[in-house]
């Protein structure tokens, strides 16, 4: 026969076990909830700073050489903002590809400029020839072949980082010239405290070393980015006005990263020796 004291102790043990089970279950649910929250936050971070990889930014070529951290399809302007740009010039994108980087033909001691004649206005860029000779030489080569002509700037990021991404003939974030470029000028004096300042033009890449191709981004507002994207040019004052006009029109997702509402097409890209 069980005494009252034994019964009391048995009930106390059972109560204790139930409490322990409830606490264990609560901890399990908390861990599950936290893991879900962490996953969601990870997705948000990746989506808003896709250029951290230009994702912002990834880069060119196939999936291993893809110019955008996540593919952002081009889209027609939406009713959310008026389109501040003109209709594109007549013509079509050239389907060009090469197996290797072009031979060095520029004068690395000379000054070069890149002019992007876009549907939104002209963007002039002073190129950093001596600091990024492979990149500048590639742009001189591609522009001379008409590679950039009639291509869309397919991506505008308005949260976390502030960039317009261009240079993909496909307009999807997947295109490239068929070759890759070495990283250059990653210790440029303009890059301070992991900030790419407004006015910078830099190469997109896949997040891996030496995966630049033809895609590049133009920074319209100081943007926190690891110094992993070759800075190869600086936008002039008139070009910054054009870039800010494009940014003011917003992007088509409302989430801070999508195709620009403005119809941004590079009618003609020209590299000139000063």
Image (cartoon, rainbow, N blue to C red):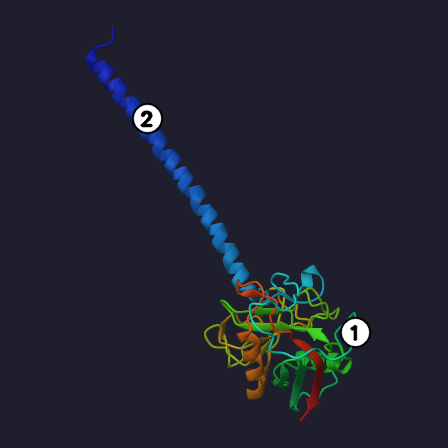
Q: Quadrant of residue 60?
A: bottom right
Q: As displayed, is residue 150 above or below residue 59? A: below
Say which residue appears at 57% left-offset and 66% top-offset: 51
In the image shown, does 81 or 191 lie closer to the viewer?
81
Q: How many numbered discs, if any?
A: 2
Q: Which residue is mark 1?
A: 94
Q: Which residue is mark 2?
A: 17
Which of disc 2 and disc 1 is earlier in sequence?
Answer: 2
Q: Residue 256: horizontal and vertical position, in percent?
A: 53, 65
The quarter of the image holding the N terminus is: top left
CA separation in Å, label 1 and label 2: 73 Å
Q: Residue furthest left?
A: 5
Label 2 environment density (alpha carbons within 10 Å; few <14, some 14–19, many ≥20): few
The local secondary structure at tag 2 comes to helix
Judge left or right: residue 93 versus residue 251.
right
- Which of the two discs, 1 and 2, sits closer to the camera? 1
Say which residue appears at 57% left-offset and 87% top-offset: 238
The local secondary structure at tag 1 comes to loop
Q: Residue 13: horizontal and vertical position, in percent?
A: 28, 22
Q: Residue furthest bottom?
A: 274
Say which residue appears at 71% left-offset and 85% top-offset: 270
Residue 204: which disc? none
Q: As displayed, is residue 247 above or below residue 110? A: above
Judge left or right: residue 47 versus residue 27.
right
Q: Residue 2: horizontal and vertical position, in percent?
A: 24, 9
Label 1 environment density (alpha carbons within 10 Å; few <14, some 14–19, many ≥20): some
Q: Residue 50: horizontal and vertical position, in percent?
A: 56, 63
In the image shown, does 67 or 88 lie closer to the viewer?
88
The quarter of the image holding the C terminus is: bottom right
In the image shown, does 261 or 9 lie closer to the viewer?
261
Q: As displayed, is residue 37 above or below residue 88? A: above
């Amino acid at each position: 026969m069980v005494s009252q004291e034994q019964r009391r102790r048995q009930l106390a043990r059972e109560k204790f076990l139930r409490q322990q089970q409830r606490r264990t279950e609560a901890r399990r649910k908390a861990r599950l909830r936290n893991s879900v929250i962490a996953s969601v936050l990870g997705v948000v971070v990746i989506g808003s700073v896709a250029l951290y990889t230009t994702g912002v930014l990834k880069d060119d070529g196939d999936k291993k050489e893809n110019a955008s951290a996540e593919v952002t399809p081009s889209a027609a302007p939406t009713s959310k903002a008026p389109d501040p740009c003109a209709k594109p010039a007549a013509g079509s994108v050239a389907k060009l590809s090469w197996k290797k980087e072009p031979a060095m033909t520029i004068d690395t001691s000379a000054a070069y400029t890149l002019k992007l004649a876009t549907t939104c206005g002209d963007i002039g860029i002073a190129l950093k020839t001596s600091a990024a000779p492979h990149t500048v030489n590639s742009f001189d080569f591609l522009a001379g072949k008409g590679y950039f002509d009639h291509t869309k700037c397919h991506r505008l990021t308005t949260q976390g980082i502030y960039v317009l991404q261009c240079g993909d003939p496909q307009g999807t974030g997947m295109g490239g010239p068929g070759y890759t470029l070495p990283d250059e000028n990653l210790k440029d004096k303009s890059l301070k405290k992991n900030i790419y300042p407004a006015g910078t033009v830099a190469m997109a890449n896949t997040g891996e070393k030496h995966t630049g191709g033809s895609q590049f981004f133009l920074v319209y507002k100081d943007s926190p980015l690891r110094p992993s994207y070759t800075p190869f040019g600086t936008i002039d004052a008139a070009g910054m006005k054009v870039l800010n006009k494009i940014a003011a029109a917003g992007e088509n997702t409302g989430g801070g990263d999508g195709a620009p509402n403005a119809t941004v097409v590079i009618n003609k890209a020209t590299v000139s020796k000063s």
